[in-house]
Image (cartoon, grey):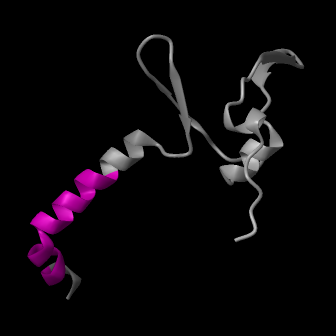
């Protein structure tokens, strides 16, 4: 793979809150977007953590929890679902 190593400012980027129109927002560096495979229109979920920390992730923890419950139900009732599918 011929990928360039991330620039130091993208790896440990410090983001500043800036005025964008009538709102406030963050500008993500191009290198960071490329490394995380993010593009305009992608959704990032905000997970509040302890001590004023935030986690931004394309991963939705609520959806993942719901999917884990569904998988557990499908495993538990696999025979029932097979019969219903006939």
Q: Position of residue 5 (x, y in %)?
A: 73, 52
Q: Position of residue 71 (x, y in %)?
A: 24, 61
Residue 4, placed above or below residue 31: below
Q: Residue at x 68, y 47 (%)?
A: 42
Q: Residue at x 73, y 47 (%)?
A: 6
In the current view of this chain or complex, which residue is farthest to the right? Answer: 21
Judge left or right: residue 66 versus residue 45.
Answer: left
| Quadrant in which the C terminus is drawn | bottom left
Q: Residue at x 26, y 57 (%)?
A: 70
- Image vertical order of residue 85 relative to residue 30, above or below: below
> Where is 78 relative to 16, above or below?
below
Q: Say which of 18 and 43 sits in front.
A: 18
The image position of residue 81, as x and y in percent, is 17, 75
Picture quadrant where residue 84 is located? bottom left
Residue closest to the far bottom? 86
Count every numbered label the image shows and give the total: 0
The magenta stretch spans which residues? Answer: 67-83
**Magenta stretch containing residue 82, yes or no?**
yes
Image-based side of 20 in relation to 33, left or right:
right
Instruction: Say which of 25 and 63 sits in front.
Output: 25
Q: Position of residue 17 (x, y in %)?
A: 76, 16
Q: Residue at x 41, y 15 (%)?
A: 50
Confirm whether the magenta stretch covers residue 81.
Answer: yes
Seen from the viewer's position, the closer of residues 80 and 67 is 67
Q: Quadrant of the N terminus?
A: bottom right
């Amino acid at each position: 793979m011929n990928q360039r190593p991330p620039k130091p400012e993208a790896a440990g980027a410090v983001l500043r809150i800036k005025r964008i129109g009538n709102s406030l927002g963050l500008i993500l560096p191009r290198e960071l977007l490329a490394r995380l495979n993010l593009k305009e229109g992608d959704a990032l979920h905000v997970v509040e953590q302890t001590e004023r920390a935030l986690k931004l992730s394309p991963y939705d923890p609520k959806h993942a929890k719901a999917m884990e419950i569904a998988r557990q139900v499908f495993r538990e009732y696999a025979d029932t679902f097979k019969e219903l599918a006939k």
